[in-house]
Image (cartoon, grey):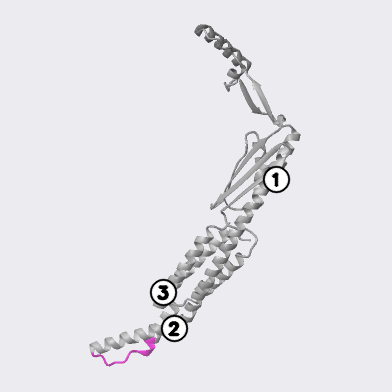
Amino acid sequence: MIRSMTGYGRGESITGDRKFTAEIKSVNHRYNDISIKLPRGMAEFEDAVKKQLLTEIARGKTDVYVSFESFSKNDVTVRFNEPVADALVLQLKEMKERFNTCDDVSLNVLTRFPEILAVERSAFGQEAKDAILTGLTDAVKAALKMFTDMRETEGASLKADILNKLSAITGFVEAIKRRAPYVAVSYRERLMQKITEFTAEHGIETPADEARLMAEILFYADKSCIDEEITRLVSHINQMRGMLSEKEAVGRKLDFLAQEMNREINTIGSKANDMEIASTVVDLKSELEKIREQIQNIE
């Protein structure tokens, strides 16, 4: 299944008094780079989340964000900083006497100072850890499902586009195959024309040495033969079509195959030395470059 490397997914899970929200975003990347940001105090669950992600993600730059809300009193601890409170009360009383005010020191005043009361997350017991891991992985699973569906939908579009371009490339290759046998014939005609023009210009009546002429034409035909390059190029096209139907991640293999196709096309253009083939090679390279751009988005 062809998948795009770009995607987004979001999932939620509610377990008891705890709510988890997971978001997954990814962009193109040469390797598989996964970054996971979990709520404070849950770092120990990172390996479990990463293993879960690796079942569906083979390549790309992936960022995972998990948020956590708890409505359980067992998950929080309120800490009263008694020494700080004592010092503040004493200072406020001194200020009252100095400025001769009537205001009393109230709890409303004291709780305005964050140093007095601090809400901290409690250490999780084993039972809480098991419940948190379940809620966390359920949220990631839901996000991963949405994320994967989006990547597969985009991957299907990429596959269809690449197959269309491969069909166009196949048409250009067929045109080159039809033209290739006439390259030597065209060369012979140009060579004979030049000989005729040269002999006429210099008044030479001696006919050209037919044996030497044929040897020159055969040498050129052998030098400009592109049969092997065409065969390899057709093979690469068929391989790419096959890869697009594989279930595993094939982005890197497709990229390598596109490079090999580009090499064969360049060789065809340089060896053939024919204007008509050279024009078709330009079209080939244009379509292949479009394919290579699309491959950069494939996992």
Return the residue nearer the eye: 287 or 278.
287
Could one spot residue 56 in this view of the protein?
no
Return the residue nearer the eye: 40 or 22.
22
Q: Above or below — where is 228 with respect to 254? A: below
Which residue has dot 2 on it? 182
Residue 231 lies, in percent from the top left, at 53, 74
Instruction: Answer with mark 1 or mark 2, whichever residue precedes in sequence.
Output: 1
In this view, which residue lies farthest toward the right? 127
Return the residue nearer the eye: 242 or 130.
130
How would you classify the magenta stretch by its main secondary structure?
A: loop
In this view, which residue lies farthest toward the front? 102
Quote the CA–CA distance across marks 3 and 2. Answer: 15 Å
Left or right: where does residue 104 sit relative to residue 292?
right
Left or right: where does residue 258 sit relative to residue 271?
right
Which residue has dot 1 on it? 138
Which residue has dot 3 on it? 279
Is residue 211 on the magenta stretch?
Answer: yes
Q: Report helix, strand or loop for mark 1.
A: helix
Return the residue nearer the eye: 105 or 294.
105
Quote the CA–CA distance across marks 3 and 1. Answer: 57 Å
Q: Above or below — where is 224 with respect to 151? A: below
Q: Nearer the viewer, mark 3 or mark 2?
A: 3
Task: Choose top left, top right, bottom left or bottom right for residue 110.
Answer: top right
Give the magenta-colored segment's residue range. Answer: 203-213
